[in-house]
Amino acid sequence: MKSLKNFFSNIKNNLISLLIFIFIWYILSLFFKDYIIPSPKIIFLNFKQYFNNNFSINLLVTIKRTLIGFSFSVLIGIFLGIFSYIFKINEVTQTTLLIFQVIPGTILGIIFLLIFGIGDKAPIALIIIMTTPTIAINTTNSLFKRNTPLENLIKTYTQKKYYLIKDAFLPSLIPTLSANLSLGFGLSFKVVILGEFIATQNGLGYLLNVARIYFNMKEVFFYLLIFVLIIFFMQIILNLIFFTLLKKYLNPV
Amino acid sequence: MEDLLLSIYIKEKKFKDHVVIENISLQIFESDKIAIFAPSGSGKSTLIKIIANIDKNFSGTIEKFYKTSSFLLQEAPLFWYKNIKENIFYPLKFYNINKDKLEKINNDYEEWLKITGLKNFEKHFPYEISGGMKQKVNLIRTFLFEPQIVFLDEPFTFLDIKSKNLIMNFIKEKYKNITIFMVTHNIDELPDFLKKIFLFKDLKLSNYKTIKIEPFYKREDIINLIFKE
């Protein structure tokens, strides 16, 4: 019951954030013409105009690319993070990964376009390159904050690594996993839009690019609102997992 | 003649260039109730960690003849994602406990909850209880499964006087057959059920004295003996 209460409390907070975002957008629209920053009211009134088959298909394509790229990033990032920690090469790995983080996404997007051509692979590769470093670095840093006294306690009962991993090591990674998934998904989504801008002929990023070319700011802001709603719903799903099923692992230590 | 449970000889244990323990030889027999009384920083916790196999970086030998043991470490860690009851019963899977013994353990558990005042806190998590309550949880976890020998590092830290006395008396009455080896720097932590106290200035052989405790000694007698030395 308490965890459901936390979950609903979290949805309430997310809704408040969404309302604050729309309010700020509304205030800004009062100072600019419709063709620069259209009012949220206009976008909401014209919603039906943009929702069509074409939109649904492109939405699914973007979500598919995001989830594939994000999943690979999480797996590779966590593996790299643990690998760096165990073999004590975290300083080398972190510096290398930071280099990838700093390279502008547009340049990488063009490189992947030339390598993979137009299609799914370029945006997915872009997500992996740009999201993995954050996840890997977070993972390594969390391993340095391992609960050593707890591991020592387990060692007084058994020397089997299985219990150390199951009862101390993995539970201590869950708070980091929560942060990684939250940060990582947002970043992945942003990157896939960038990738679709440059290297595809479908997806929300492509539609956004077309709207931008025709200076259709109402459509641009419509897609902006969709992006915000996608992140909002993804956050709800993550909170459902972490504030209900895995809540106890997020307790203060 | 009591059985030998542990024979330990530490030739040397150092951290970087600083020698912490040197030429310590200890033998612990069944039903012994021994304390090492030494100042802070003298290597007491290091000794416990060596016996517990947590610290393997030393020169010397350890021979263990006991089947079951339990350790109360100085950091007193609890699993942050388990409630109090789950924390206390965590070691259950590591002991071979039959149905009859499990029933006795459950009864003892209820007694412990009464003595420590934790009855209403079973479902609480560690972050919801105080330092003193956490120490009580650790004490219950250490003694509940009646291992052959328990090793205690500063076991009564954070406890108020009333709780400390209640728990010491409870252990004295209930666990007469358990071998106890404890280390502390706090004179108030020395229970009156001890049979022997080793007084160390630091954990090097040349620097210790032994105080033998007679069964009729009270705590004030033990404290006076220590001050005399």
Image (cartoon, coloured by chain):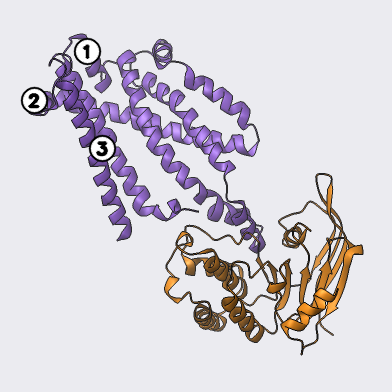
Q: Secondary structure at mark 1?
A: helix
Amino acid on which disc 3 is placed: Ser
Q: Which residue is farthest bottom?
A: B216
Q: Who is closer to the viewer here, A173 or B48?
A: B48
Q: Who is closer to the viewer here, A56 or B226?
A: B226
Q: Residue A38, position in %: x, y?
A: 14, 20
Q: For mark 3, what is the residue?
A: A17
Q: For mark 1, what is the residue?
A: A212
Q: Residues within 10 Å of mark 2 (few under 14, many from 20)?
A: some
Residue at screen point 65% across, 36% down: A87
Q: Residue B44, position in %: x, y?
A: 76, 61
Q: Chain of mark 3?
A: A
Please identify the quarter of the rendering in which residue A225 is found: top left
Tell me the quarter of the image containing the C terminus of chain B.
bottom right
> Can you tell which mark lies on residue B163?
none
**Residue B166 sits above or below residue A226 on the image:** below
> Does the rendering let one see residue A203?
no
The CA distance from mark 2 to mark 1 is 18 Å
Q: Chain of mark 1?
A: A
Q: Which residue is farthest right?
A: B206
Is mark 3 in CB contact (under 8 Å) with mark 1? no
Q: Colour of chain A?
A: purple
Q: Colour of chain B?
A: orange
Is mark 2 in CB contact (under 8 Å) with mark 1? no
Q: Secondary structure at mark 2?
A: loop
> Does the rendering let one see residue B171?
yes
Q: Residue A217, position in %: x, y?
A: 17, 16
Q: Is residue A185 left or right of residue B115?
A: left
> Can you tell which mark lies on residue A46?
2
- Lower position in the chain sequence, tag 3 or tag 2: 3
Q: Residues within 10 Å of mark 1 (few under 14, many from 20)?
A: some
Q: Nearer the viewer, mark 3 or mark 2?
A: 3
